[in-house]
Amino acid sequence: MIRAGIYARISSDREGDNLAISRQLEDCEELAGRKGWQVVERFVDADISAYSGRRRPEYARMLDEIEAGLVEAVLVYHADRLHRHPRELEDFIDLCQRQKVKLATVTGDVDLSTHEGQLIARIQGAVARKESDDKSRRIRRKHEELAQAGRPSGGGTRPFGFEANRLEVRPSEAEVIRECARRALAGDSLRALCLDLNRRGVATVTGGEWTPQTLKRMLTSARISGQREHHGEIVAKAAWPAIITPAETQRLRAKLRDPERRTNRSARRYLLASLLRCHHCGNRLYSRPRDDGARRYVCASGPGFEGCGRITVMADPLEAYVVVSVLERLDSPELAHALNGGVSADPAGSEWQAEVERAQELREKWAEMTLTRQKQIVGALLEHIVVGPGRRGFNRFDPARLTHVWRY
């Protein structure tokens, strides 16, 4: 008995009930029964368009099963369920010829083993491609008309700040947008805003936590200033009211989309970036300045971070102390012992004297070195430093908080 596989696909399942898929499977099952074929597998790609070019996982799996000889025939409701691109059809024809696979459709057999069958499949594929092109063109034109008229396109998740009809403002969320816009323009980072929103329990429209990417997308959207955009360009005044002014949107876009803007730029000015660990949770500390610009390292928590948030240490005194420790380590007997393969060096020997001189040279030139060179030297000697909690009421830098883990 011929082992057959059924392939079913629907490009859009708006209701989510898969009724169209079920009908395709039922009709193919009946066709298999009439042909005396045994259905051994069903391949279903739901809500995926063949025209879009997106990868269809079940279609790819079916090709693998055909290649392996596990499927000897393919049943589909119509040939256009298989392909919308001529190139893809040609590859399928080559595979079917090579593996001697039969193809049957509910709407009429297509025998890919014959030239006539291949011609029919190609004609059907060309017609299906034209239908898809026409449909795509109509949809694009429809969206262009809606954009130029300032009307919403509809569908999808409602925008933050607006009701489900996309036209009425939701006051509580609108106030959040105004606050975030004001603070972002004043210099607050997106990550700091997200931490604040999540701490206050302000959820996104899906009920999740805010991330810098989500917040940036919302703040740079023309929608919140009562404007309609299409393909990233503002094309009309919108049919819904504005929450912030168009001028504010222009400033937010210029600020948040600036290619020179780096959310981690401060990390380039920090000597110990990636070398500090939290005593409590073991996660790395990140560079994060205070609102007044003072540099510090923190155990970061919140979106995108796994830290506990319980450790903070000011960068200036910490880095100054670590530099002294590293330079002292350079001419220490411990380092010489490690570099000599565990054999103690003779302090009176010429090799040890040369090491001492090189360490002295590094001390003298340290301030003139680039930050990159300084980090290379520190990283060559230090595996990491564990930063412990500060003492209550002790407001000065406390070296006792540090545990050095040396490489040498």
Image (cartoon, grey):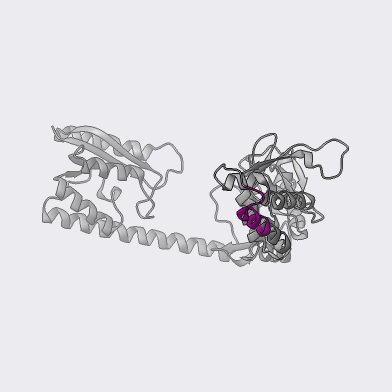
Please state the horizontal and vertical placement of residue 164, each as a whole percent of the image: 62, 46
Asked whether, in this view, residue 150 is left or right of residue 198, the answer is: left
Please state the horizontal and vertical placement of residue 9, each as a whole percent of the image: 34, 44
Image height of 212 relative to 389, above or below: below
Asked whether, in this view, residue 26 is left or right of residue 347, the answer is: left
Residue extent of the magenta highlight? 346-358
Image height of 174 relative to 185, above or below: above
The quadrant in which residue 229 appears is bottom right
- Taking depth in this image into account, of 230 and 276 the one nearest to the observer is 276
Please indicate, yes or no, whether residue 40 appears anywhere in the rendered image. Answer: yes
Please state the horizontal and vertical placement of residue 71, each as a whole percent of the image: 20, 38
Please state the total of marks drawn on the protein image.
0
Image height of 311 relative to 159, above or below: above
In the picture, the quarter occupied by the N terminus is top left
Please indicate, yes or no, whether residue 239 appears anywhere in the rendered image. Answer: no
- Taking depth in this image into account, of 366 and 266 the one nearest to the observer is 366
| Residue located 39% across and 59% down the image | 135
Q: Please identify the dominant SS of the magenta region.
A: helix
